[in-house]
Amino acid sequence: MTSYEEILESAKRLSSTERLQLADALLAEELGFGMWRDREDIADVADYVSELRDAEMRAPDGREKTPEEFLREIETFDE
């Protein structure tokens, strides 16, 4: 297995643009799936999150929500 130090040294050889791309990719990965990684009951985290997102886009009757319905629902999350 590659050690953290080896990966860090490899990352240091990247250009500034590549470092930013790497940082963005790692951050997106962590923010997108980080809270789910430690769940032992979820085998494929990316698939699980994709299913959750797909379900959020559908009304209880199975039809796709309109943009207005989706936004109205999001607005009520903080209430």
Image (cartoon, grey):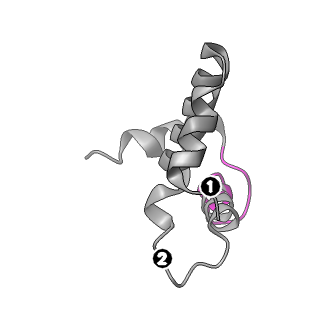
Given this view, does label 1 or label 2 mark the residue nearer the observer? Answer: 2
| Towards the viewer: 11 or 75 | 11
Instruction: From the top left corner, tell me how far across and down residue 53 is, in percent.
Output: 62, 55
Query: Is residue 58 rendered magenta in the image?
Result: yes
Position of 34 relative to 16 (above/below): below
Mark 1 — residue?
A: 53
- Magenta stretch: dominant SS? loop
Q: Which structural element holds mark 1? A: helix
Query: Going 51% across and 36% down the picture, which residue do you hit?
Result: 71
Say whether residue 28 is visible.
no
**Location of residue 24 (image quadrant):** top right
Instruction: From the top left corner, tell me how far across and down residue 35 is, in percent.
Output: 43, 61
Query: Going 54% across and 84% down the picture, which residue do you hit?
Result: 41
Q: Give the range drawn in magenta.
A: 54-65
Query: Going 63% across and 58% down the picture, which residue do you hit?
Result: 2
| Disc number for residue 12 | none
Position of 21 relative to 38 (above/below): above
Q: How many marks?
A: 2
| Disc number for residue 39 | 2
| Towards the viewer: 70 or 53 | 53
Distance CA(mark 1)–CA(mark 2): 18 Å
| Towards the viewer: 55 or 17 | 17
Q: What residue type is labelled 1?
A: Arg
Query: Going 66% across and 24% down the picture, which residue do you hit?
Result: 14
Position of 4 relative to 22 (above/below): below
Q: Which structural element holds mark 2? A: loop
Query: Is residue 78 rendered magenta in the image?
Result: no
Label pair 1/2, CB-CB below 8 angstroms: no
Instruction: From the top left corner, tell me how far across and down residue 63 is, in percent.
Output: 74, 57
Q: Which amino acid does label 2 sit on?
A: Arg
**Location of residue 59 (image quadrant):** bottom right
